[in-house]
Amino acid sequence: MGRPRKLEPSVLVALVDGYYEEKAAGNAAKIRFSSLEAYAKEKGYTVKSYDFSRCREAVVRIEELKNSEEMRREETLAAAYKSLDVEGLLKQCTTVEALKETLIRMDGYWKRTYMEASALITRDRAFMQEKGKLDGKIRSLKEENARLQENGKEMLKENTALKRENVYLRRMLRTYLYPGIANQILKESGLPVEGENAVKPEKFGELIEGKKPEAFRGRQKTPAPVLSWQERLQKELERQVSQDGNP
């Protein structure tokens, strides 16, 4: 059997809301991904805890529930404090002017508190949105990095194969082309050359008959040191001088 299809984000968010109302009793702090998995199974869904943790919409919804619950708690505490404070004010403030001055001072304090709390909530929401964008970029960069690494492996293989082929072709050039150039130089200098061909007869025959060079098979022996044409010409001259000097 194939792997079960992943649930849509909207379904996961609905499960979060259902768990929040039915199991957590409106307490977002009790929401756990493992608990959501168990709750989903009760509802007949095949889902894992990591499906919730990897779903951006579900994670954002959990944070929204926590933030809204915190705001309701603060509003409840503020209302309770004011009701108690009003009773205390009536006892402490004996004149209208004193009561007015105290209420104005309290109003300014709560206004500043409200503005600061509102700014913090706005900032936190912006941070969460930015975090979601950055998480998406991180995932994209990881995928791009994996792709580049795979391409790098392929390029390394191709580069290795080209190096081997280059060694093979250079050896063929040293065998079949360089001696012809050296012989041509000897001929133009009026020095004796073996045969009339620029390439040695046996080598020329090998080329015509197709015996060599063989097709490149990806493996080559370590090439022997390469002499420059000047060095090879010098050795050829020394050989001929040595032959002419012998009786």
Image (cartoon, rainbow, N blue to C red):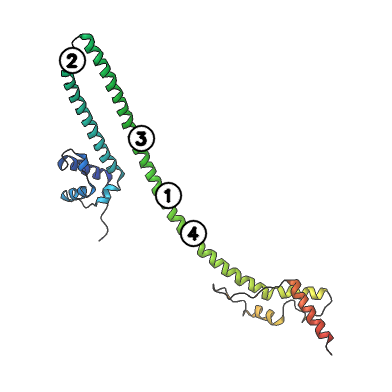
Does label 2 or label 1 sit earlier along the sequence? 2
Q: Provide the residue designation for mark 4.
A: 152
Q: Quadrant of residue 108?
A: top left
Is residue 66 placed above or below 144 in the rendered structure?
A: above
- How far is mark 2 from mark 4, CA to CA? 80 Å
Name which residue lies at 44% across and 53% down: 145
Q: Is residue 140 left or right of residue 193?
A: left
Task: Give whichever of discs 2 and 3 has the lower sequence position.
Answer: 2
Q: CA distance from mark 2 to mark 3?
A: 44 Å
Q: Residue at x 15, y 15 (%)?
A: 91
**In the depicted structure, whether residue 75 falls above or below residue 236:** above
Is the Cβ of the residue at disc 2 closer than 8 Å to that at disc 1?
Answer: no
* Label 2 or label 4, whichever comes before in sequence order: 2
Mark 1 neighbour density, 10 Å: few (under 14) some (14–19) many (20 or more): few
Q: What residue is shown at x 47% (from left), y 58% (from top)?
A: 151
Identify the element where label 3 is drawn. Answer: helix
Kindly check if marks 4 and 3 are in contact, taking CB atoms under 8 A apart as contact. Answer: no
Amino acid beneath label 2:
Gln
Q: Which residue is mark 1?
A: 141
Among the two numbered marks 4 and 1 on one chain, the one whose residue lies closer to the N terminus: 1
